Amino acid sequence: MPEKHVFSAISTLIGLTIGAGILGIPFVIARAGFITGIVNIVVLGIMILILNLYLGEVSLRTKEIHQLTGYARLYLNNIGNMLMTASFIIFTHGAMIAYIMKTGEFLDALLSPSLGGTPIIYSILFTTLSFVIVFEGIKIVERSEFYMVLAIISIITLLAIFAIPHIDPANLTSFSYKNLFIPYGVVFFAFLATPAIPEMNEELKNKKHLKKAIIIGSVIPMIVYILFALVVVGISGANTTDGAILGLASILGAKIMVMGTILGILTMTTSFIAIAFALTEMYRFDYKLMDITPPMFSCFIPLAAALMIMNSNMKNAFFQVLDITGSIGGSLTGILILCIWWKARKTGKRKPEYAIPNNILGLILIVMMILGIVLKLYEIFLV
């Protein structure tokens, strides 16, 4: 198999993983304490890596092409299927709403001084261009993901080089047990990219490379998140904003802010395209909708919701969307993936190229995700 297929699969996972979540990570880490946040990044990063491997095994045990909702219909009962559909829709649409809002804000900061416009106008433009890419299909998605991922890693490296002299070590020493769960929702959101796994399986001609692609594609975002948090929190400290990059302008200057803004646009574009394509596949393969309808539903339903939120003047709307989506939608998705894996081991119609033997590990992950849901619901309704 040509190595480019492995690189394409890795790029798909990295591109979907490194999205709006990377911009929310410094904000929650600054609130929780830097060391507290790094513990979250490492623990949840490993947790999602294992979850990705579980889903990869499910895709290898299944002969047909499906997205998460299709696996739920195949392996779970009606209640499990409905829960997966609900969680998949909550997570994917929550993610896309966040991407649309923040990309509109970044494009406005970058372009409005010379071209005019508003964040709402740029959000509409961004969604429309993304729709064109998704409508063209998986080949253009593969190509766009690969080059965008290279650009993202290059810009983060350059940003770190320019930013290191401005880092204050005092911003990087705090730890608090009581704040341990503050970053959970945003960090979980930032890592969860399960819709990419079926796409990776579809891209790879030789399925034995799927495990390697999942591991590499899961570890690289962990490194990137730690580096990005180190730079932003090290510079901004308690003044870190919920979009991270725009708050650095007063310290690093306008040119670095432009570089960071382009980084933000790229990260969200890669993730938006990957999720929109995953939703398109869900509509096509799982619900048998054809023609232009699936990509239209995938792109413009989240746009409508994003525009409503942008007009509502909600405080810290970007952070709140990431936090709730990750804590509830993401955790529920993870629990159901493990339920699917247990069933697929017994009833799958294909021998997988790899298999995860540890049931205890899955139970530990479920307990952690249930705890994340309970704590967020408690915070929403009782605090």
Image: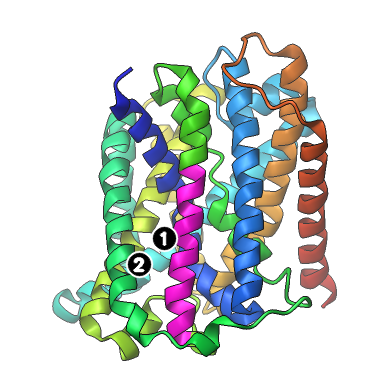
Which residue lies at the image location 60% right of the left edge and 52% below the top edge? 45
Residue 121 is situated, as x and y percent measured from the top left of the image, at 30, 67
The reply to whether dot 1 and dot 2 touch (C-beta < 8 Å) is: yes
Residue 273 is situated, as x and y percent measured from the top left of the image, at 38, 45
Residue 361 among those drawn in magenta: no
Q: Could you say which is closer to the camera, residue 191 or residue 327?
A: 191
Count of labels in the image: 2
Left or right for 196, reference 164: right
- Kindly indicate the quadrant of the structure image that contains residue 204: top left
Q: Residue furthest left?
A: 114
Which residue lies at the image location 35% right of the left edge and 67% below the top edge? 104
Q: Secondary structure at mark 2?
A: helix
**Magenta residue span:** 217-236
Q: Could you say which is closer to the camera, residue 243 or residue 360?
A: 360
Which residue, given by chain and number where applicable, does mark 2 sit on? 104
Q: Quadrant of the N terminus?
A: top left
Q: Can residue 109 be seen in this snapshot?
A: yes
Which residue, given by chain and number where applicable, does mark 1 sit on? 100
- Which three-letter amino acid code belongs to the residue tagged 1? Ile
